[in-house]
Image: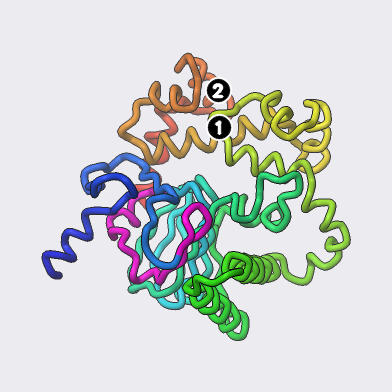
Amino acid sequence: MSARMGRLVLFVLIEGMPAIDYSHQQGTVVQFPFSGYQQGHRRPGAFHVFRYEESIDPRQVRAQPHRHDFYQLLWLEEGGGELISDFNHMRFGPKVLAFFSPGLLHAWKHEVEPRGIMFGFTPEFFHTNSDCPGLLGRLQFLHEAAEPMMAFSGESAREMSHWFSQLHVEAARNLPGRDDIVRAIITIILSKARQHHEGPAAEAARSGEATVAGSLTQRFRLALEQHFPKLLKVSEYARLLHVSRTHLNDDLRMRTGQTASELIHERLLLEAKRLLVYSTSLTVAEVAYQLQFQDPSYFGRFFRHRTGLSPGAYREQELARQAKV
């Protein structure tokens, strides 16, 4: 490996900042902001697309647990290895679509050299803040997937390759209507992924699609991801969504069986687990403060009530389990 490539392994460029050395930041979760991607074909604040094998991201950074503040789709024509998503480890080969919603913690262990196309876009690009979040509101797999990856084969794989190639070509054409064309192609890709994920069994439920697409529940889930952990009160989300607390809770109970408070606590618990396991440089008290608990002892009671373990015991148990994987 050349000296120049050796330096690329250690650094990643973030807009408005000098190169940052991540090689000494073990025990932390790397945050990749949308503004940090300056390569490929892009429109600031909207989208970027580039060949994955041409990415300037250092290999060590990909292998370190990290997350984004934007949606990311990755079509791997070639490659293989392991993807870690939160606490799940999954093997993958070529012809896979990986998809990451904002905040999802993940890391790559590439064992076969990857080749493919990466596309990232902001929530605003699909107008997820509107009263009717549309397509993204219908894609439950995009937000709740335990395994954010789908394998394709045969005609479906060729079709996915075609659309990603078209996406790369159209994004390079800085002409009037480019954003609409890019958005249309991504709509096709996501809809094809939905068909692949749900299969023919979803046909029976398709008649109620419009109602689900604009449902208060979907808007709440999108808002929770966007504003967590700044907003943690049910009243704050009710006000943001222009409904009463009662209306919000009634809709959530009908569609999920849980109240807004229960879903917020569920999200808090997930983030607590992420920080305890992947941000080992943080003390338990620092994790509590990051999640806006004013008293670390209350955080301990919150965590133990839902897991049966103290935060420290959970960290030790999960790190030991991860070491065996």
Residue furthest to the left in view is 3
Residue at the image point whose x is 34% and y is 65% from the top: 55
Say which quarter of the image contains residue 280.
Answer: top left
- Magenta region: which residues? 42-66
Residue at the image point whose x is 77% and y is 71% from the top: 200
Position in image of residue 14 (x %, y %)? 32, 49
Q: Quadrant of the N terminus?
A: bottom left
- In the rendered image, residue 238 lying in the magenta stretch gets the answer no
Q: Nearer the viewer, mark 1 or mark 2?
A: 1
The residue that disc 1 covers is 268
Nearest the viewer among 191 and 36 is: 36
Task: Give, as a three-letter code, the residue at label 1.
Answer: Leu
Say which quarter of the image contains residue 257.
Answer: top right
In the rendered structure, the answer to whether residue 103 lies left or right of residue 21 reads right
Residue at the image point whose x is 40% and y is 39% from the top: 277
Nearest the viewer among 41 and 55 is: 41
Nearest the viewer among 293 and 57 is: 57
Q: Are marks 1 and 2 in contact (CB under 8 Å)?
A: yes
Position in image of residue 314 (x %, y %)? 44, 33
In the rendered structure, the answer to whether residue 194 lies left or right of residue 16 reads right
In the rendered structure, the answer to whether residue 134 lies left or right of residue 308 reads right
Q: Tell which circle, 1 or 2, labels the residue nearer the N-terminal end.
A: 1
Up the image or down, 58 lies above or below 314; here it is below
- How crowded pointer 1 is (Cα within 10 Å; few <14, some 14-19, many 20+) is rated as some
Up the image or down, 96 lies above or below 222; here it is below
- How crowded pointer 2 is (Cα within 10 Å; few <14, some 14-19, many 20+) is rated as some
Say which quarter of the image contains residue 99.
Answer: bottom right
The residue that disc 2 covers is 302
Would you say residue 91 is visible in this rendering?
Answer: no
- In the rendered image, residue 59 lying in the magenta stretch gets the answer yes
Residue furthest to the right in view is 207
Residue at the image point whose x is 68% and y is 67% from the top: 191
